[in-house]
Image: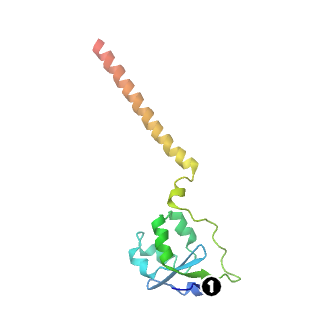
Amino acid sequence: MSSTQELTYSDVSEHSSKKDLYLVVHDKIYNASSFVDEHPGGEEVLLDVGGQDATEAFEDVGHSDEAREILEGLLVGNLKRAPGDPAPRTSQPTSASSSSNQGGAAGFSSIGIYAIILLGGVLAFGAYKYLQANSDKA
């Protein structure tokens, strides 16, 4: 497509079937009709957000950089906002590499779990050696 179109929510909402499926992600409109059968999450996921703003659903899953490249290949145009349209989603796009650095508490808790497992292993080994040494004396 040589030039991008500007469509309204009303225009996008008319494209919500499996054979004619438009999605809005970060105010860009994508034609996902050709990708419905290939989507790793299943067609239901796309059909649930067809003809509407899918930004939140797209970002919540944490799509890979490859998925974002595929999405760019499906670009139809930009969303032209009109009075009365739903407010834009506030979530920002994240790449796969930056999403792994988010949520410091989640990262700490997974490290904490490994530390607890390691500490438990060391204590179990120490108890085993202690009991083995005491059984040799008896």
Residue plotted at (54% across, 87% down):
14
Please tell me how crowded label 1 is: few (under 14), some (14-19), or many (20+) other residues with Cα within 10 Å: some
Residue under circle 1? 8
Residue plotted at (36% across, 20% down):
130
In the shown orientation, is residue 52 left or right of residue 42?
Answer: right
**Element on which disc 1 rests:** loop
Does 38 appear above or below 97?
Answer: below
Q: Nearer the viewer, residue 3 or 33?
A: 3
Measured from the top left, where is residue 118 in percent x and y?
43, 35
Question: Which quadrant of the figure has residue 29?
Answer: bottom right
Q: Nearer the viewer, residue 4 or 119?
A: 4
Measured from the top left, where is residue 31 in percent x and y?
49, 81
Does 98 appear above or below 88?
Answer: above
Measured from the top left, where is residue 136 in percent x and y?
28, 15
In the shown orientation, is residue 43 left or right of residue 106?
Answer: left
For the C terminus, which image quadrant? Answer: top left
> In the orientation shown, which residue stands out farthest toward the front?
2
> In the orientation shown, which residue stands out farthest toward the top?
137
Residue plotted at (53% across, 62% down):
95
